[in-house]
Image (tube, rainbow, N blue to C red):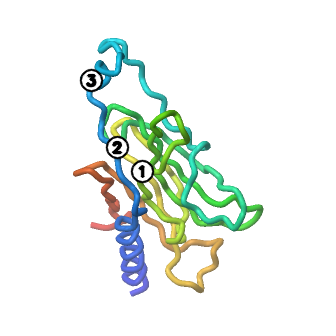
Amino acid sequence: MHWLTTATALAAVLGAAALVQPPDATATPPVAVEQRAEAGEPAGAEKPEAAPDAEAADYPLECGGGETEVVDRGSADLDADGRPETAAVVRCAAGMGTPPHGVYVLGSASGGGAPRVLETLVDPAEKMNVTDFAVDDGGTISATLLGYSGPDVPRCCPDLERKVEWHWRDGKFRLTALPVPGSV
């Protein structure tokens, strides 16, 4: 019975994570080769664009006057638009404790400004921690999400764990929860 309750709670948290996004999150459409040529760039002389710098971004994270900390990051062309994006695991810097993580997808800002958050994959308000974070060249973001089955569980010791992946489909990132080990 305990496992059924745990699985139900984790499914609810993962479902909420898939639906919660900042209201201004949009993916930028690719710039066509013809547009680059019109801008005076030779068609054959394209140089690869650098991935957004996770340290330079401004994250929608309330840290009570403290700093944000990038815990992990990975870059690849996540939305198949020909330009690299960066996925970053971020939390409020803390001397002690385990502050919740956020997972954000960053895109380059036009005009060379700070990278901008395109999408929030895990909101820190969900009070989850992220481990085993990876971004592969095929555009898959994978992680293990650690959570809590209730408010009485100490924040040091998450009692829920689920491996997940995000893939770009139909204009947005889609969350896939991987099977629980030992399940059929």
Quickly name the residue at label 3.
33
Q: In this view, does 157 lie above or below 76?
A: below
Q: Which residue is drawn at 49% across and 56% down?
A: 103
Q: Label 2: state its secondary structure.
A: loop
Determine whether the residue tagged by mark 1 lies in a helix, strand or loop: strand
**Residue 170 horizontal side relative to residue 36, left or right:** left
Q: Which residue is drawn at 58% across and 62% down?
A: 61
Residue kind at label 1, given as amino acid type:
Leu
Q: In this view, does 47 lie to the left or right of 115?
A: left
Amino acid type of the residue tagged 3 in the rendering:
Val
Residue 98, horizontal then vertical, whole percent: 66, 66
**Residue wearing tag 1:** 118
Label 2 – label 1 distance at C-alpha? 8 Å
Q: Looking at the picture, does residue 114 appear above or below residue 49?
A: below
Label 3: state its secondary structure: helix
In primary-sequence order, the first of circles 2 and 1 is: 2
Q: Residues within 10 Å of mark 3 (few under 14, many from 20)?
A: some
Determine which residue is flagged by label 2: 28
Q: Which residue is found at the position 52% from the left and 83% from the top?
A: 150
Query: Residue at 36% across / 73% down in the picture?
Result: 11
Could you tell me residue 54's position as x and y percent?
A: 56, 43
Q: Which amino acid does label 2 sit on?
A: Thr
- Spatial CA distance of label 3 from label 2 is 15 Å
Q: Are marks 2 and 1 in contact (CB under 8 Å)?
A: yes
Q: Quadrant of the C terminus?
A: bottom left
Could you say where residue 134 lies in the image, as x and y percent from the top left? 47, 45
